[in-house]
Amino acid sequence: MARDDRANFGSKLGVILASAGSAVGLGNIWRFPFETGNNGGAAFILIYLVCVLLLGIPIMIAEFSIGRHSRANTAGAYQRLAPGTQWRWVGRMGVLTGFLILSYYSVVAGWTLEYIGEAAGNGFAGKTAEEFIDSFNSFVGHPFRPILWLVLFLLATHYVIVKGVEKGIEKSAKIMMPVLFLLLLVLTACSISLPGAGAGIEFLLKPDFSKVDSTVLLNATGQAFFSLSLGMGCLCTYASYFRDDTNLPRTAFNVAAIDTLVAILAGFIIFPAAFSVGIQPDAGPSLLFITLPNVFQQAFGSLPWLAVLLSLLFYVLLALASLTSTISMHEVVTAYLHEEFNLPRSKAARLVTSGCILLGIFCSLSLGVGKEYTLFGLTLFDIFDFLTAKIMLPLGGLFIALFTGWYLDKQLFRSEVTNNGTLKFAFYKTLVFVLRYIAPIGIAAIFINELGLLKG
Ligand code: PHE
């Protein structure tokens, strides 16, 4: 496809909101709290923040530069910038990662639709914490219901993808991001004023570094990549639709700041509420879905209409935030099939959607009727999460850092970062240093440590 024929995001705000829309999603509101809970609380958050600053922002600028310069899907981008080399496998691995994440992510996104229904029907009224746990477990284990929602969610994603970049992706992000943010603020205020919430706040603010080991480091790194949509060419694909005057470092900084703020707010909603009703912080993937209904129930129980209104609004926004993320993953794979195999966009999208529905069904069933089929004690759903977030994304990030730090022409990289020298970027040297040394050595060290190669 000729460079000029490709779609573009229409405005600067659109660029930031679409990228932030990709980044903000279940990763912040569902995954961040349960990873924080599983990894000991405040110390994990501090390490996470270091990962965002030291790995996330530099690698995001690298992905933006690769994508905007090549104006191609992520696999095509490496082909253009490094023709005839093996670097194209970095792009291809990204496409595969996106496909796998989309499959299991849509399962959880589907759960949000079930909870929209519950909220609308005032289904949380009068329930105890125990009852919330039971109803979550019986829903997730049900053979059909979660699958129905999963399919519906993927079809909605498909619809936006087929409508195209500017109309679909940009418009939806512009409306829902600010509303989501406001609602999160309201819910934070409610949660921290619940009785006994103090223990949850302490859990978030008092670090205990004695629990930090290489697994915690890997989990924080993986969470940073997952939450920022990094390491799989997602923001690289989006950047291929950026305008020539988009300020890449500033956009990266803004996206990382918005994403981190939402994650921290989610922590301040979930943990005070969890401690208040006696739910263990390491409850895992069910954490969001059992603590949050409790917040609505306890904070607004005496005003049922407000409880219905706010819980409905929350789940609708959570579904929309997930949608802007699933769209971005879908786009990576669709753009790849469309541009590399010359398939019409709609046919490429149909292939991706059907493939994800199939894999998603297996992931969903692995939490219910297929529970006994495990590998190393992990269900298929957990394997997908582990493999993508903790292996493939950090590995992708490692290669992206090596590619921009060592292989890519320095002149080209500098001119992308500074828009042909028209922008000043005071940290350019630091950026190159981080991409050359800190990021690759840091990620490799975490992997090696975790694999136990240094322990024996
Ligand atoms: N960042 C998204 C979230 O936090 C998930 C995602 C991962 C999106 C990878 C795109 C690519 O929910």
Image (spheres, rainbow, N blue to C red):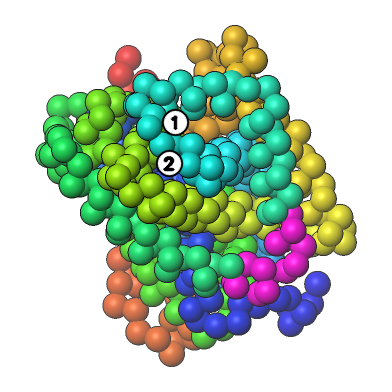
Q: Position of residue 147 (x, y in %)?
A: 69, 32
Q: Position of residue 110 (x, y in %)?
A: 60, 40
Q: Circles 1 and 2: CB distance less than 8 Å?
A: yes
State yes or no: Cβ of the residue under disc 1 lies below 8 Å from any atom of ligand 1: no
Amino acid type, callout 1: Pro
Residue farthest to the top, as pictured: 372
Residue farthest to the bottom, as pictured: 422
State yes or no: Cβ of the residue under disc 2 lies below 8 Å from any atom of ligand 1: yes
Return the disc, 1 or 2, that comes first in the chain's sequence.
2
Report if residue 191 lies within the magenta region.
no
Q: Is residue 200 left or right of residue 246?
A: left
Residue 395 drawn above or below residue 236: above
Front residue of 281 and 65? 281
Q: Position of residue 212 (x, y in %)?
A: 22, 30
The disc label shown at residue 329, or none: none
Magenta stretch bounds: 158-171
Q: Which residue is mark 2?
A: 30
Residue 382 drawn above or below residue 220: above
Instruction: From the image, give the main secondary structure of the stretch colored magenta.
Output: helix
Q: Quadrant of the N terminus?
A: bottom right
User: Secondary structure beneath disc 1?
Assistant: helix
Q: Is residue 38 left or right of residue 114?
A: left
Report the residue at 79% width, 54% height from top.
Answer: 349
Report if residue 163 lies within the magenta region.
yes
Task: Please say whether residue 383 is visible from this viewpoint.
Answer: no
Task: Please say whether residue 245 is visible from this viewpoint.
Answer: yes
Amino acid type, callout 2: Trp
Q: Quadrant of the C terminus?
A: top left
Q: Which residue is mark 1?
A: 285
User: Secondary structure beneath disc 2?
Assistant: helix
Neighbour class for label 2 at 10 Å: few (<14), some, many (≥20)? many
